[in-house]
Amino acid sequence: MIGTNRRLPQVVLLWQVMAMFVAALSTTTALSFLSMATPMSGTGRVAVVTGASRGIGRGIALELGSAGYTVYCLGRSSRSTLDEGTTTPDIDFQRPVAEGLDLTVESAAEEITKRGGFGIAVPCDLGKDGVIEDILANRVQKANDRLDLLVCSAYTTPPTGIRGEFWKQDLNMWDYVNGLGLRQVYAACRAAAPILIDTAKKNTAANAAPPLICLVSSFGGKSYTFNVAYGVGKAAIDRLSLDMSYQLQKYGVATTTLYPGLVKTEANLEMEKDGSWAEQSGGLDLSVGESPGFSGKAVVELAALGKDVMMERSGSVEV
C-alpha cells in the first residue's frame, strides 16, 4: 500500500500514485458505507477548527457549517484587530493567493452561518503559548459547556520554500514547519482533552457519535516528501493521534489522522498561475486535485459515525 512504501525513488511518483489512490478510494467514499451523517448532523454540536481562514482548514470549517455545527474559526488572517488592547496577529509570511479573495476568519464564519451552521471568528496567533488554552477555556467551554470536535489544520511554511537538503537549511526550518504544525497541535489537544472527556460523559444516547480529535497530516508521514523536517513532523502528528487514542479510549473520546490528497488550495492555484507550481510540486498535475471542501466532507462523515464504529477506528489514518 502507498501508506507504507518507503522506497519510492522520487517524490513525484509518490504523489502521482497517491492522487490516483485517493481518487479510487477516498475517505468519503469508503465512509459512505458506514455513514450516519444527515444533512444537519452537526446540529447542537460544537467544533473548533484551527487554520480556518484558508486552505484545507477553511474547507473543513465550511463543510461543518453545512452540517449545522457551531464552528469556532481560528486563524491569523483577520479583517480587524483582536480583542481590545491587542493587535492583529503578526504575520511574517503567508503564501500568495489571488487578489480580491477575502480569506479571513470573519469571512469563513459568515459563510458557515449562511450554510446553516453558526460561525464564530476568532482571530489569534496560535504560535504563541497559552493562546489556544485561553480560547478553549474562556470562549468555547464557557459559552457552550461542550466540545464535540477539534480539527487541527493550521500550518506554516518559510518564505524561502520548503524543498532542500536538511544540512543546508537554517535551523528555523524546523520551527517553521513543526512549531505551529506540531508543538501547537499537541498544545491544542492537551487543552481540549478535558472538555472532550466531559462532553463524552453527557452523550447518553445509545451509540451516539463520540467527541473527536481530527489532525490534518499528509502522506509525508509515511514516505519522503519535500524535506526532512516536514516528514518528521507529519510522522509525529500520526503518532500523536495514535498514542492519544490509547489514553482517551476509556473516556469515550476518539482520534483520527486525515491524509488529504492533492488539494486545490488558494495558494496552490496561485502558484500554478504564476508559473512556480511545477518546480515546487515536482511536476504534479493540479487539475486533478481535490477541493478543500472534499476533506471537509470526510470530516463530517467521520464525526457522525456511531461510537462503536468510531472508537474501533480511533487512532487510525484516514485517506
Image (cartoon, rainbow, N blue to C red):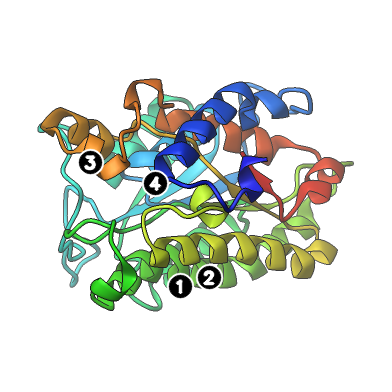
Whole-number angstrom distance, CA of label 4 to CA of label 1: 24 Å
Disc nearer the start of the sequence (4/1): 4
Whole-number angstrom distance, CA of label 2 to CA of label 1: 5 Å
**Amino acid on which the number 4 mark rests in the picture:** Ile
* Residue depth check, mark 3 versus mark 1: number of the one nearer the observer: 3
Q: Are marks 2 and 1 in contact (CB under 8 Å)?
A: yes
Q: Are marks 3 and 1 in contact (CB under 8 Å)?
A: no
Whole-number angstrom distance, CA of label 3 to CA of label 4: 38 Å
**Amino acid on which the number 1 mark rests in the picture:** Arg
Q: Which mark is residue 280?
A: none
Residue at 46 percent across and 32 percent down: it is 16
Disc nearer the start of the sequence (3/4): 4
**Amino acid on which the number 3 mark rests in the picture:** Glu
The answer to whether residue 37 is seen in the rendering is no
Residue at 29 percent across and 70 percent down: it is 173
Whole-number angstrom distance, CA of label 3 to CA of label 1: 29 Å
Q: Which mark is residue 120?
A: 4
For mark 3, give the secondary structure: helix
**Amino acid on which the number 2 mark rests in the picture:** Tyr
For mark 2, give the secondary structure: helix
Whole-number angstrom distance, CA of label 3 to CA of label 2: 32 Å
The percent position of residue 177, horizontal first and vertical second, equals 35, 64
Residue 43 lies left or right of residue 210; in this view the side is: left
Residue highlighted by disc 1:
183
Q: Which mark is residue 279?
A: 3
* Residue depth check, mark 4 versus mark 2: number of the one nearer the observer: 2
